[in-house]
Image (cartoon, rainbow, N blue to C red):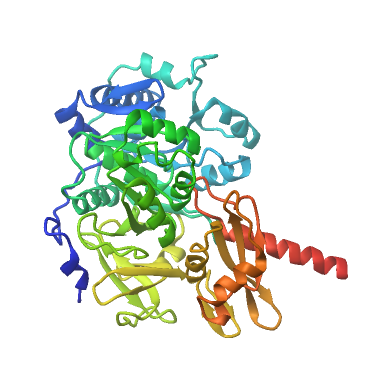
Amino acid sequence: MNRPWYTHYPENVPHHIHIPSQSIYQLLENTEQEYAASKAIIDGEKELTYYQLKNLADHFASALYQRGFKKGDRLALMLPNCAEYIIAYFGIHRLGGVVVQVNPLYQSSELEYILKDSEAKWFVGHQTQREKLEQIGYEGTAIFITNGDGRQEHDFYDLIATASIDLPSLAIDPQNDLAVLQYTGGTTGRSKGVMLTHANLISNVYQSFTFSAGIFEKPGEQMLAISPFFHVYGMTSALNIAVFAAAAIICVARFQVDNVIEIIRKYRPTFFPGVPTMYIALLHHPEAESAGLDCIKVCNSGSAPMPVEVMKEFEGKTGSRIIEGYGLSESSPVTHRNPIRGQRKPGSIGLPIPNTDCKIVDIDTGTVELAPGEAGELIVKGPQIMKGYWKKPEETNIALRDGWLYTGDIAMMDEEGYFYIIGRKKEMIIAGGYNIYPIEVEEVLYQHPAVEEVCVFGIPDPYRGETVKAVIVPRKETTVTEQEIINWCKKRMAGYKVPRLIEFREALPKTVVGKILRRKLVEQEIEKANKAESKRG
């Protein structure tokens, strides 16, 4: 197949790389052997070297093993970014266990679904999660981080302190053995458990590191780990790659912009995998220019499209460079990235990374490859692509066809092999027979000087099919009217794309990763319409 993107690879980046057959635990094992004294974790006042990290992970693995933990057992890990998450993560992998990723903000019903679906008989979380487990009648073994107050039978650090290093031999088949069950966001129906093998995750580490050749030094980097480890983006880009590169991982449990500004001042991070909303918040912080953001060599942006205007303004103010990429839970997650050195195209997700193939195919059948410049569904193939969905063979067969992952994203490729995401199949707005992708309307709105954040979506319309609505968070100390926004759009886009409904809010609903929840806004509109209809009835 034709791969025009190879022409634009930086000179020191190969098209294809050898990826060793190894387990996730071996990432830590290899780094500890070579860089034992290097700093591994900075978590508030707690700091650990790679020697200390591996020692704690081995003791935790031994504690699990002595209590009956077996290869293939699922353990639900419900923690924010912290030292304990990293210790548990590698301890589980030492035994060939499967990490079930759980958002610590989940409530009882959400937690119950994941525990039942994954059949996780083991759980690690903060003691504040105890009540949720009691509410759902969890019968597995629960281990809690108690912070030293009220130590109990299954206290995380007590188990580590009392465990002797008594471990079975490392017996993992990287190609077939599961390492992680990564539950998707559940934008359509119940969330699905994405089955990621050791080979999937290891491949993405080597692919991503290679594509950053000459930038990511080994050792010596400081990784600002704000993107949650329990999300596939944070797990790969802030944790696994950092361990592979013997970087110091600066754990940030929650994104609070004032706190992050102080952390940057204190620790001078060099890499920052973030999402657009984080960069927007930093950009508008009054101390953005004086915080020393220029210490960050590269800001990787993922999880959601990065508005071009935000990218330009952030880089102009801070001197830092934002590199946009693309990925999914189903691809471990990275498939595309703009070159750090070489031609970067703002607004593009960049080029397929080494060992990755991509095509744009027709939306109706998914079988006809489209020419450059034509919009269709993005499909990808590579060693980072999931094994399938946990206990969902039918949905696996829809997503994986002949080795290709059908992403559900509408994209186009230009003549030089750079890819652009236009929208999701299910987010496309059809108004008056015209196809409208929210991202293209949002790009125009982000250029308005009074717009800080925006989300565009379609709402049912009896005449046009759907009407375009924009929900906007204005910048502080600015005033703007609905008509001003509409007039701005009319001058910059086709009339059928112009939002007919404008709403101003103080904040937009977001996931814990910082991704704007378009689905939530749509649900709120539907609920509002149903209430209005019932009143008329």
Q: Nearer the viewer, residue 448 or 208?
A: 448
- The residue shown at (50%, 17%) is 153
Give the quarter of the image for residue 372: bottom left
Q: Position of residue 252 (x, y in %)?
A: 43, 34
- Can residue 484 be seen by looking at this rendering? yes
- Position of the N terminus, as image quadrant, is bottom left
Q: Is residue 174 left or right of residue 312?
A: left
Q: Is residue 42 left or right of residue 140?
A: left
Is residue 2 positioned above or below 214 on the image?
below
Q: Position of residue 199 (x, y in %)?
A: 25, 50
Q: Position of residue 242 (x, y in %)?
A: 27, 39
Give the quarter of the image for residue 227: top left
- The residue shown at (59%, 55%) is 474
- The residue shown at (37%, 31%) is 265
Count of numbered labels shown in the rendering: 0
Q: Nearer the viewer, residue 408 or 197?
A: 408
Is residue 350 positioned above or below 248 on the image?
below
Give the quarter of the image for residue 400: bottom left
Q: Nearer the viewer, residue 25 or 169?
A: 25
- The residue shown at (43%, 62%) is 393
- Position of the C terminus, as image quadrant, is bottom right
Q: Is residue 170 left or right of residue 88?
A: left
Is residue 198 positioned above or below 166 on the image?
below
Q: Nearer the viewer, residue 217 or 453?
A: 453
